[in-house]
Image (spheres, rainbow, N blue to C red):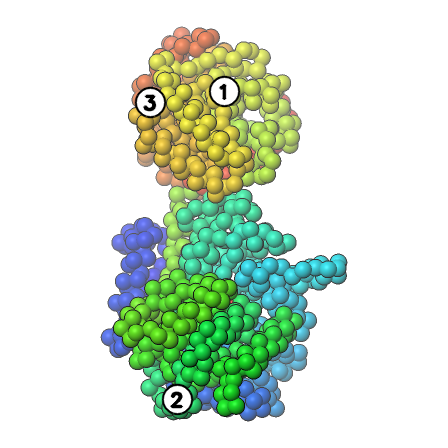
């Protein structure tokens, strides 16, 4: 990402869409992403190409970024007795309190001026701080896959925001730690002990973590537990606010903000509330469980909604993403699409981005003298024995007890191996403040002790169990010398240990036994032996198979995995994610240009009050009723619309028409006692409420297909619980809005497939897909076709003399029915609404009315186009043409400023304006009704 990428980020920052559309940047998402990828590849210098992973450690070290310490010294922290990776950019072991934030920042700015700025926000910073005397700070690399992977990301000008793993209550300490961290491009979020206990140990690691790994919620045995869940959830939100505040302080326009993991599910929402134009991504490092698991969580909806505020939501695997979309459709009732989750036109893109490692760093580390020395030591220690390696945080998800049991079974079944093989298990202590982790530690020790007692000898034990964090060089050496890596996670977001093992096995070509419940199984499945860790017998026989595997099979398997690990690096992962996030914003901007502007209600009302003969056309479903996705919706007029509608209907200067796809009885029930016009079945039936229904059905309408379609709809209704179908005179509708959303959608897909390609595909019918329905209609039955006939009838019936000078047409119409909007438009592209109507409307390319629309010629035109001129209503409606012939001038005298077509709760529409929901329809009609009162 060098010069060309910078051009891209300039485009993003400036939202320069005009430029975007004219300078050759492709318009489709895939084309843009392919191009970005090509640019990234081309921008790699030839030197970067040594080894597949780009961005070598040396390079990163020189730029002063935080990195895995292949080029740094490592230190054993003598006071704690544990081995850790000390991390300083100038000097690896000295305390860093003297480093100043400003010096460092300036230096970085110059060297990284061309890079995209990236704010990485994660609960844990890549370094954990330990306070020394004199307010000095030692910064040690934190353990865990998230940190390892993100340390490999070097393409961006990255700043980290997170918790340093330590409580600092005094101002001086906070100040010095902030300075020390600034040298690592890290910014601390300070959490007090109470928050850490409630948020991190409590809500994150005792509730979300087990739940997301299918271990269920903790059992409650008394009400105080419920109360503590609530206080943990409150602390979770509070902690997320603290993160949001720090991000806000650090944010500069154009930055990409990348939020990580289950600790920060509220962060996207808080950030967008603070700044809606911020580019916000969220990535989950754990699995996202099936919606059936997620729905057990009391705060399930709030969490989903908050994550949805992000522009891009990423997961390690397609399955996790699918579960998330499914939870949003089933729990929030939103629309899941192949692209993500949609709510009233707002798309949250959901994709899989499998993480990788900085493979080059591992490969190069193997050449270092210290690593070679460790390799030699290990070879000597384990001479004559094969070594099976396990490296895990001591976490219940890692299946360490299962691993030990499988190894026990293997020894039991293979006595000849008993003194020739050892299981070397590194169990890095983690989250020791959570009681479940303390229990696990004792459990594992007990099992290991028992097995060693059973199979050990005076001089050797079969399991070497180390409860500690290893330094990087020792870890690399272990990866390189061992014969088999055994990963038995019962669930694991990805599992980077398996990647790291493969990266270090270029010479030995050891075997990877990998749990099928780790995300890594999807990428390393070709080369690994996949196992179900719960099946102890299977794992035991896989160990046996691995130890006896012939060299050529090991080579082949290793080759597959090595290729994957070295090409799908952490750098690639981050670059792909950020590139998609940037593109998601471009896409949203492009979509915006296709979205009509919001209706300015005050303008519509103002024009209404100044006109003398108004025509108001209202859709019914989701326009005058509750929104589509509210549970238990009935086809019923909203109670808050009754009064305003009644007032409007009583106004002598206003004619109100409700036009709906619904049948006559639905409209009768809702509007029988109002004084207005009703058009049922998309205008096939018409009546003024004081009169009888009449048909406006066109002649020669072909309905031969009805029986065949009916049979198909019956078939799908029987097989889709809670779906229903309705037979109308000119249409059939199958709707599944009360069915399981995903199943309904799959059924609809099958149904559509059959209608489009099956035996009735040549019938004279239109197939229309609604958001949760499929409708089949006679050809050319649309609201736009009907409005012509309806208008004629109304004009004739009311004996209208004064031309109609104001039209408001609002509805949640299917695309096909949007021809009702264009009926009142005059197709002259150069015409524009005058500026007084609405400034945003004047920017709309499709708005084309400027001069009076003469209904006679317009209607005739439409009739010609649609071959709908010959109408035979049961009650005669004479043609408007003849009406005009009889009565002289036009009945429509519509200035552009006085025509308002509005789609309700739609994202894209041919209408001039949008109303977000039926709530806004209520507001509009109320304000109009208020003016009727005062004016008349
Ligand atoms: O920060 P801690 O509470 O000490 O825990 C360490 C990290 O554990 C989890 O790692 C996950 O991320 C890895 C990289 O994507 C993935 O390979 C692994 O399967 C996950 O378990 C956790 O998600 C991180 O937030 C923690 O920092
Ligand atoms: O003593 C150790 C052992 C392991 N790791 C690192 O911890 C990470 C574990 O990541 P993984 O994705 O396997 O699981 P997680 O712990 O994140 O759940 C790997 O990068 C290891 O290199 C470490 O820092 N110190």
Disc 3 vs disc 1: which is toward the camera? Answer: 3
Q: Is residue 491 left or right of residue 859?
A: right
The residue sitting at 37% across, 75% down in the picture is 547
Q: Quadrant of residue 298?
A: bottom right
Question: Could you say which is closer to the camera, residue 271 or residue 845?
Answer: 271
Q: Are marks 3 and 1 in contact (CB under 8 Å)?
A: no
* In this view, 622 is above or below 882: below
- Residue, disc 3: 764
Disc 2 vs disc 1: which is toward the camera? Answer: 2
- Residue, disc 2: 383
Label 3 and label 2: CA atoms lie apart by 81 Å
Residue 445 point in image, percent of width and height: 59, 78
| Secondary structure of the residue carrying numbered label 2 | loop
| Secondary structure of the residue carrying numbered label 3 | loop
Q: Are marks 3 and 2 in contact (CB under 8 Å)?
A: no
Label 2 and label 1: CA atoms lie apart by 89 Å
Mark sitting earlier along the chain (3/1): 1
Res 368 label = none
- Residue, disc 1: 679
Q: Quadrant of residue 211?
A: bottom right
Image quadrant in which the N terminus is located? bottom left
Label 3 and label 1: CA atoms lie apart by 23 Å
Mark sitting earlier along the chain (2/1): 2
* In this view, 911 is above or below 425: above
Q: Are there few (<14), some (14-19), or many (20+) residues within 10 Å of tag 1?
A: many
Residue 680 point in image, percent of width and height: 50, 20
Question: Could you say which is closer to the camera, residue 206 or residue 272?
Answer: 206
* In this view, 676 is above or below 554: above
């Amino acid at each position: 990402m060098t010069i060309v990428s910078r051009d891209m980020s300039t485009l993003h920052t400036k939202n320069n869409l005009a430029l975007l559309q004219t300078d050759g940047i492709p318009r489709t998402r895939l084309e843009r992403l392919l191009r970005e990828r090509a640019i990234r590849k081309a921008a790699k210098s030839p030197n970067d190409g040594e080894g597949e992973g780009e961005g070598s450690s040396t390079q990163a070290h020189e730029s002063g970024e935080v990195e895995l310490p292949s080029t740094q010294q490592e230190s054993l922290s003598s006071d704690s007795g544990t081995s850790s990776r000390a991390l300083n950019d100038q000097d690896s072991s000295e305390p860093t309190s003297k480093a100043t934030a400003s010096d460092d920042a300036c230096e970085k700015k110059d060297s990284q001026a061309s890079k995209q700025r990236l704010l990485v926000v994660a609960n844990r910073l890549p370094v954990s701080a330990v306070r020394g005397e004199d307010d000095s700070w030692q910064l040690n690399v934190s353990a865990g896959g998230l940190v390892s992977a993100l340390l490999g990301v070097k393409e961006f000008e990255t700043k980290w925001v997170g918790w340093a793993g330590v409580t600092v209550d005094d101002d001086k300490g906070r100040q010095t730690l902030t300075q020390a961290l600034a040298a690592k491009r890290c910014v601390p979020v300070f959490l007090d002990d109470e928050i850490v206990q409630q948020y991190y140990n409590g809500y994150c690691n005792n509730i979300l973590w087990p739940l997301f790994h299918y271990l269920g919620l903790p059992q409650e045995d008394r009400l105080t537990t419920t109360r503590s869940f609530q206080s943990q959830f409150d602390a979770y939100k509070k902690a997320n606010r603290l993160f949001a505040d720090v991000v806000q302080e650090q944010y500069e326009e154009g930055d990409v903000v990348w939020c990580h993991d289950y600790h920060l599910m509220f962060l996207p929402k808080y950030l967008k509330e603070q700044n809606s134009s911020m580019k916000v991504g969220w990535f989950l490092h754990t699995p996202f469980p099936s919606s059936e698991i997620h729905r057990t969580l009391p705060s399930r909806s709030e969490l989903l909604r908050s994550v949805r505020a992000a522009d891009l939501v990423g997961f390690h695997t397609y399955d996790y993403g699918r579960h998330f979309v499914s939870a949003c459709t089933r729990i929030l009732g939103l629309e899941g699409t192949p692209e993500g989750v949609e709510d009233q036109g707002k798309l949250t893109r959901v994709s899989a981005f499998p993480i990788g490692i900085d493979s080059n760093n591992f490969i190069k580390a193997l050449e270092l003298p210290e690593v070679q020395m460790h390799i030699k030591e290990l070879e000597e220690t384990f001479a004559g024995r094969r070594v099976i390696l396990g490296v895990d945080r001591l976490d219940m998800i890692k299946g360490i007890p299962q691993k030990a049991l499988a190894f026990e079974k293997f020894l039991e079944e293979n006595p000849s191996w008993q003194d020739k093989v050892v299981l070397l298990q590194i169990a890095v202590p983690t989250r020791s403040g959570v009681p479940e982790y303390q229990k696990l530690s004792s459990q594992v020790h007990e099992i290991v002790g028992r097995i060693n007692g059973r199979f050990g000898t005076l001089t050797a034990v079969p399991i070497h169990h180390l409860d500690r964090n290893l330094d990087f060089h020792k870890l690399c050496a272990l990866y390189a010398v061992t014969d088999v890596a055994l990963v038995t996670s019962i669930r694991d977001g990805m599992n980077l240990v398996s990647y790291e093992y493969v990266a270090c096995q270029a010479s030995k070509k050891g075997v990877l036994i990998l749990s099928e419940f780790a995300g890594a199984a999807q990428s390393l499945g070709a080369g690994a032996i996949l196992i179900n860790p719960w099946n102890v017998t299977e794992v035991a026989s896989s160990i046996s198979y691995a130890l006896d595997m012939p060299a050529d099979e090991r080579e082949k398997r290793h080759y597959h995995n090595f290729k994957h690990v070295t090409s799908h690096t952490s750098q690639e992962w981050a670059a792909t994610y950020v590139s998609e996030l940037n593109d998601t914003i471009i896409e949203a901007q492009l979509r915006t240009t296709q979205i009509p502007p919001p209706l300015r209600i005050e303008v519509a009302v103002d024009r209404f009050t100044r006109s003398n003969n108004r025509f108001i056309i209202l859709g019914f479903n989701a326009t005058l009723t509750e929104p589509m996705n509210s549970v238990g919706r009935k086809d019923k007029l909203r109670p808050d619309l009754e009064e305003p509608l009644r007032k409007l209907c009583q106004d002598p200067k206003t004619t109100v028409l409700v036009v709906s796809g619904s049948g006559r009885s639905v409209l009768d029930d809702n509007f029988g006692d109002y004084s207005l016009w009703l058009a049922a079945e998309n205008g096939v039936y018409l009546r003024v409420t004081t009169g009888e229904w009449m048909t406006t059905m066109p002649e020669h309408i072909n309905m031969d297909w009805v029986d065949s379609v009916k049979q198909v709809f019956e078939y799908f209704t029987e097989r889709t619980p809670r779906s229903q179908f309705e037979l109308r005179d000119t249409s059939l509708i199958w709707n599944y809005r009360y069915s399981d959303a995903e199943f309904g959608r799959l059924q609809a897909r099958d149904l559509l497939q059959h209608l489009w390609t099956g035996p009735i595909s040549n019938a004279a019918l239109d197939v229309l897909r609604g958001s949760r329905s499929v409708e089949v209609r006679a050809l050319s039955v649309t609201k736009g076709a009907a409005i012509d006939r309806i208008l004629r009838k109304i004009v004739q019936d009311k004996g209208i003399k004064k031309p109609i000078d104001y039209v408001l047409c609002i509805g949640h119409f299917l695309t096909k029915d949007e021809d009702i909007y264009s009926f009142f438009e005059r197709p002259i592209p150069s015409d524009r609404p005058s500026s007084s109507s609405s400034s945003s409307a004047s920017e709309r390319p499709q708005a084309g009315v400027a001069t009076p629309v003469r209904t006679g010629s317009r209607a005739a035109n439409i009739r010609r186009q649609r071959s709908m001129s010959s109408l035979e209503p049961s009650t005669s409606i004479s043609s408007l043409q003849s009406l005009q012939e009889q009565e002289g001038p036009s009945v429509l005298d519509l200035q552009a400023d006085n025509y308002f077509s509005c789609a309700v709760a739609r994202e894209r529409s041919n209408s001039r304006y949008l109303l977000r929901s039926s709530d806004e329809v209520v507001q509009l009609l109320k304000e109009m009704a208020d003016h009727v009162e005062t004016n008349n």
